[in-house]
Amino acid sequence: MNARLLALLLWLPTLACAQGFAGLGTDAEGFAPPDPAYRLTFPADHGPHVHFRIEWWYLTATLKGEDGTDYGIQWTLFRSALAPREGDGWSSPQLWMGHAGLTTPSRQFVAERRARGGIGQAGVTADPFLAFIDDWEMRATGPGIDTLDLTARGQDFAYALSLTAEGPIVEQGQHGYSVKSRDGHASHYYSQPAYSVSGTLNLPDGPVKVTGQGWLDREWSSQPLSATQSGWDWFSLSFDSGARMMGFRLRDTAGDFTAATWITPEGQAEPLPDGALNVAPLATSKVEGRAIPTRWQLKLPAHDLDIEVDAVNPQAWMATSFPYWEGPVRITGSHSGKGYLEMTGY
């Protein structure tokens, strides 16, 4: 059997396990469970955690062209493991997938890459930090992840961006232990939510110079969801006041689960428990034959937050091996600003 075909066949059972839906509630016997006593350590935790089943390096940016047009980009590298170990060559049980998205007000550009670990086609190193798949890169240009160069390309788009952190790394949940269900399912999770971004988008009509804000999420686990959870609605919001918020709703037949982190302009994080954040869809759009919520109301009474979140492009559909909605949003109401929204499992 052709080695690449074998790698593809090995990948297929885990395709749905790479991001938070459709399989992340299945048993993960033999893999490491998240530990609430664990404390994040850098730069080591910028790298892979091969004893855990799933992991991702996920960066989004809200951008603006010189003419005022809004854009958004996504760059994600997923690691999914067949076994909790390293390996050389084709014997490696580590599988990799890359997603790149570029959103304009009227178009959505999408690309996907897949790779098998151990053959040099994809991987991550912690120090100096580099995450790559084929010729897509998230590469540190200084210590840690404070400054990054980011590149990706698809059939009809590309981008090359430089990012500089303007605040500290944020630990999500309690010391980076992020609970995802009332049953106690969890992940290790941290963010760098305060990048300034500049660079160039290459679109069919030509290059576009852009500036804006970026947000990097790092998360790893083995079974982060409950078997009754079908997907999530995840928000990363940057307010004009300088404050930021991460919040999510996990849809569950036993009752939805929510969590949030409020981040001050100085980068101090306050984790907020299930129920503190109220998330309600206000309007849907027909996207690929599905009704997708593209306008939301979010309320966080602890910080007098009552906002509406609207998609820049309601058709920001990621038509990848496991399809989902992902795109930039505008914020109005008690707080104004921009952010990113990801919706899985619809």
Image: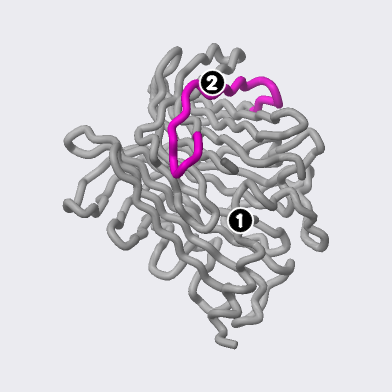
- Tell me which numbered mark, 1 or 2, is placed earlier along the sequence: 1
Query: What stretch of residues is rendered in magenta?
Result: 271-291
Q: State the residue at coordinates (57%, 22%).
A: 280
Q: State the residue at coordinates (48%, 51%).
A: 145
Q: Is residue 241 magenta?
A: no
Residue sitting nearer the eye, 18 or 65: 18
Residue picked out by circle 2: 298
Mark 1 is surrounded, within 10 Å at the Cα level, by few (under 14), some (14 to 19) or many (20 or more) other residues, namely many
Quarter of the image that includes the C terminus? top right
Q: Give me the disc on residue 18.
A: 1
Name which residue type carries label 1.
Ala
Q: Position of residue 6 (x, y in %)?
A: 60, 80
Q: In which quarter of the image is residue 43?
A: bottom right
Badge 2 marks a residue whose secondary structure is strand
Please give left or right for residue 151 compared with residue 253 in the image. left
Name which residue type carries label 2.
Leu
Residue sitting nearer the eye, 131 or 103: 103
| The furthest residue to the front | 289
Residue sitting nearer the eye, 263 or 256: 256
Secondary structure character of the magenta stretch overall: strand
Q: Does the magenta stretch include residue 282?
A: yes
What's the coloring here?
Answer: one colour
Q: Position of residue 298 (x, y in %)?
A: 54, 20
